[in-house]
Image (tube, coloured by chain):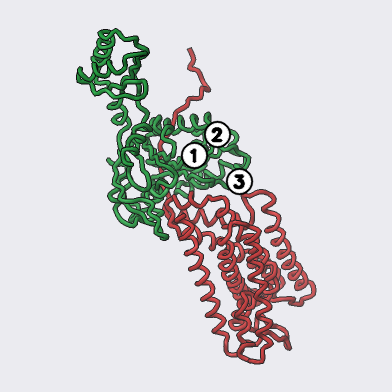
Chain colours: A green, B red
Amino acid sequence: MTLIATESLTKVYGGGVTALSELTVAVEPGIVGLVGANGAGKSTLIKLLLGLLTPTAGRIQVLGLDPTADAASVRARVGYMPEHDCLPPDLSAAELVTHLGRMSGLPRTVARERASEALRHVGLHEERHRPVGGYSTGMKQRVKLAQALVHDPDLLLLDEPTNGLDPAGRDAMLALVHRIGTEFGMSVLVCSHLLGEVERICDTLVAIDGGRLLRADNIAAMTSATDVLAVEVSEGTEALAARLAALDLPVSREGQLLLVPLADQGTYDLILGAVAELDLPLHRLDQRRHRVAELFARRESSHA
Amino acid sequence: MPEPTGVIHDIGYQRYTGLRLGRRQVFGALYLHGVRTVFGLGRSAKAKIFPWLVVGIVGMVAAAVTAIRTQIGEVVMTYAQFADAMSWLVIFFVAVAAPELVSRDLRSGVLPLYFSRPLPRADYPLAKLLALVTGLWLLLGAPQLVMFLGGAFTADGMRGVWDELLDLLPGLLYAGLWAVIFASVGLLIASLTGKRAFAAGGIVAVFLMTTPIVGVLSILPSQTANQLAGVASPPTLVQGVGLWAMRDLLITDQDGVGPDLGPFGPVYALVAVALVAACVALLLARYRKVAAR
């Protein structure tokens, strides 16, 4: 089943601002990263997924349901963690999450039980009975996550879950999101403007920019084809490049480095053989795993 | 070897397959939560002070009226007059309760958490409005019940109790009218701002600042303007409707002079209905805007 599918989805706000333009994407269940700069249209997409906004044009489906026609059914199966502050400071986390559980249709006692379970899963224990106003940013983010979990949704929409957290807090939050996506049996859509963050935990990555789809693909597919070997020799770089080109290797230069796409183990042998033949001082030969960020960087610069 | 006991296993995340309640029960839960909020229940001690102070004053007045009646036998005020006499307290009660119900949620930004849940977006303001109406009606109605019990126990036989009941019911209806008008106006004003102090000030201002307009209109040389003056302010509007519907219960003095409505009694009733309808429509429009943010 397709988790989220959009077809030429367009959203133009009242003032004539185009937030999403002709977005067509289909993602499978799992952990999905939605990346894009601020203002790229991530939050608009989330609101469309929740049925809080109606699309100007195009179609959208979540869990096989249409949020514009049947928002209640979609929302019953989706948990939403907003980007901004959304916690009343004078309520305790337990009270708030219980109340919101009831708003999702859980009976009173079930709501209370599931609220403390959800808070336990995000790592809040005894402190859940204290007013939220006294919590640290990290704890507040956890409460926001717990309220999205309380009614046991099939899909979590997390808008910038690492916002305002320090590096350790970011790692902890990402680990938690990863655990939810892999162990809780629910799909997760994580929004972030930091690609480096989400690429660590996602199965699928959707990148949007200026309301348009930049790329949507499986993380494995994005990275596996792009492993390269970086060769550095102290002298004779030109000669080596010519030699490798003669061996039918698509070699490219980057400063002092020669980059050769890694086809299989044979590539190592060919390069080592060439270096030995030319009798060059080999400085380094290592496999460089492309960060997904570089893919996008290259793509964008080629557009420009 | 005995099995180890008392070991806590982390059984991991459990999916929920049980009952999920429908829209009506969720609405009911939100409504009850609202009624509790009006009286500061389930909130901090600070939030309880003002509502219960007002409840205390209203209750004491009712007790005093009842006591005077049972001891001296003199009817100080009818049930309907009681609601009129308490109008100032009701205004202040609304000025505290309405912001507590809606402004707090606007300020803390919790609304996206409601609107991302299945309940339709109109349910949130309607549940809050109904909760405030209920709260105000209880505030005015419960003391009347105390007065009724006092009156019923001193009444002569079942006949007297029945007469007493026939007096009470219009009183409760009149309290309901106060509750509906004040709640819809108050909640609409409170829903415009996230700052509770502003909301409270705005509510008191609307209820009190419109009083001078009534004063000016009622001394204009035109008789029609005089008779329609009460429409300009919510409290006098409510009193006008009351006078039109049950003059005997509101003016008990032989030579008592109430405001003269002339032939415009039905106009008062129509304006009251239109005011409530307009407030509810604006409230829903307001939340349509808030939900899309």
Amino acid at the residue labelled 3: Pro
Residue at label 1? Answer: A146
State the image quarter where residue A301 is shown.
top left
Amino acid at the residue labelled 1: Ala
Question: Would residue B124 appear left or right of A272 to someone viewing this image?
Answer: right
Q: Quadrant of the N terminus of chain A?
A: top left
Q: Tell me, for residue A89, which label it has, or none.
A: 3
Please tell me which of labels 3 and 1 falls first in the chain. Answer: 3
Task: Tell me the residue at 46%/32% (across/down).
Answer: A174
User: Which chain's residue wears label 3?
Assistant: A
Q: Is any atom of residue B271 visible in this view?
A: yes
Q: Quadrant of the C terminus of chain A?
A: top left
Residue at label 2? Answer: A124
Residue B142 point in image, percent of width and height:
65, 65
Q: Relative to residue B116, is residue B213 depicted above or below?
A: below
Same chain for the residues at labels 1 and 2, yes or no? yes
Given contact means CB atoms under 8 Å apart, are the residues at marks 1 and 2 in contact? yes
State the image quarter where residue B196 is shown.
bottom right
Alpha-carbon distance for marks 3 and 1? 16 Å
**Foreground of the two, A177 or A58:** A58
Q: Relative to residue B279, is residue B220 depicted above or below?
A: below
Please tell me which of labels 1 and 2 falls first in the chain. Answer: 2
Please tell me which of labels 2 and 3 falls first in the chain. Answer: 3
Task: Tell me the residue at 23%/14% (across/down).
Answer: A266
Q: Secondary structure at mark 3?
A: loop
Same chain for the residues at labels 2 and 3, yes or no? yes
Amino acid at the residue labelled 2: Leu
Task: Tell me the residue at 36%/54% (across/down).
Answer: A11
Residue B140 point in image, percent of width and height:
65, 67
